[in-house]
Amino acid sequence: MVFSKVLTVCAISAAFVASAVTTAHADPLTDVEAGPLGRAQVQRLALDEDGYLPVVKLSEQIVRIPVAADGDATLETTIYKPEGPGPFPMVVFNHGKIHGDPRMQTRSDPVSLAREFVRRGYVVVAPNRQGFADSGGTYVQDGCDVTRNGMSQAADVATTVDYMSKQSYVDAKHIVVAGTSHGGLATIAYGTNAASGVRGLINFSGGLRQDACTDWQGNLTHAFGTYGEKTHVPSLWLYGDNDSIWPSTLVSQMYTAYTDNAQGKGATAKMVDFGSYKNDAHRLVGDRDGVQVWWPSVEAFLARVGMPTGVQYRVAEPTQPKATHFASIDAVDSVPFVDEAGRAGYRNFLHQYPSRAFAVSDSGAWSWAEGGDDPMSVAVANCQKQSADPCHLYAVNDAVVWKDGATQTADADSPSKNDSKPALASR
């Protein structure tokens, strides 16, 4: 059985501080080949009256990338692109694997991560590998051979990088490949034969859990060690202490196996232990709240490998409605229209952690959502599935936003899709 949890988010400590573990080896990046970034035709938007860049929406495009090994198979791929012809640096982001049939996964749509990179002028590319979501082909299990499994996944990463590098708006000399969970394993495996323009690898809680396999932890550690022997690309590893999938001792073993075998080959690696994140560190990258945790380390890594980090756009984010003081947040009996089941649902909502939202309709339908990029839109949309009447937000985070006769909803321009679907409940 292959097990890797979908990214969802539940809680964060107010006193959270990211901490870095020292770099394993000296940095070899003393002579990085220049690319066309200096001549990038980035559209320079006029400043508004307050001297700020105007806010632009995060647009996405879905394309199908052909798989060279099978002319009939294509990879369902989401592209987030800045305005202008480029060429832009590129980030390829690789998704994780949920428990069960990979075809039941939704399209990889890492909105929070994409927003952070697009505002800095990057193209962000999120392919679904073969057998996942609506991509063609078949997911290859490779038995208990984690090393081979990672390489099988890396083949689709290579296909994506090769195809996108040929697009006129992509700077093929400034590429970073990143991934989470199973996608983190695929990312590090891809590093064994990365394209010449790939300057760095970012591993968010990467690995593959196979509980049914004998010594699955040893198999996983061996896989990372094998990749370390063949990789020449610098990497950044980000893992948390309360990860529901990876014990901290296993993370240390994986990283040590990789760095020990990478010595002298130029594949410098840096581990960042960011401590505890909400109720599960494995969910960090799929949550908009997580950006403040991972971005500082990623920004430093990007600068170190010769990638840009300066903000070029202000990209729209979900906007929380203003508090209305209709009732206190914990006044369960003040929630309008709902029955006892709805009041129980609201009590459950109160035990969740920001970001969170609760929506209701005049006919008593309700829903709450938590985590991801925009729980407000998700709560309203799931409430609407249960109601012929319009659903509206009642509470967001720690504030009641409801108005009698003039209800408020999430910002109409807010994104409503999430790579990591929030935890949710509804009636």
Image (cartoon, helix red, strand yellow):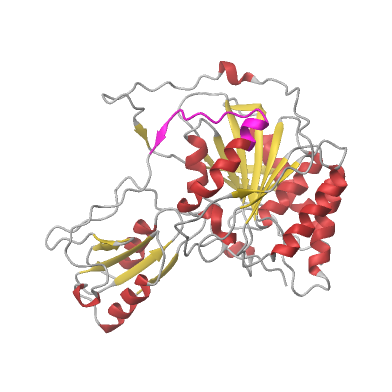
**Within the magenta stretch, is there residue 304?**
yes
Residue 252 in the image, given as x and y percentages of width and height: 75, 58
Q: Give the range drawn in magenta.
A: 301-315
Front position in the image: 144 or 340? 340
Front position in the image: 366 or 223? 223
* Residue 84 visible to an observer of this rendering: yes
Q: In this view, does 199 lie to the left or right of 309?
A: right
Front position in the image: 18 or 370? 18
Q: Residue, x 25% and y 76% (percent of image)?
A: 332
Q: In this view, does 209 lie to the left or right of 256?
A: left
Which quadrant of the rendered structure holds the N terminus? bottom right
Q: Residue, x 55% and y 20% (percent of image)?
A: 40
Query: In the rendered image of this protein, does residue 65 appear above or below residue 361?
Result: above
Query: In the rendered image of this protein, does residue 391 appear above or below residue 57?
Result: below
Q: Splitting the image into 4 quarters, where does residue 205 fall?
A: bottom right
Q: Residue, x 58% and y 60% (percent of image)?
A: 281
Which quadrant of the rendered structure holds the C terminus? bottom left
**Within the magenta stretch, is there residue 365?**
no
Residue 240 in the image, given as x and y percentages of width and height: 62, 58
* Residue 130 visible to an observer of this rendering: no
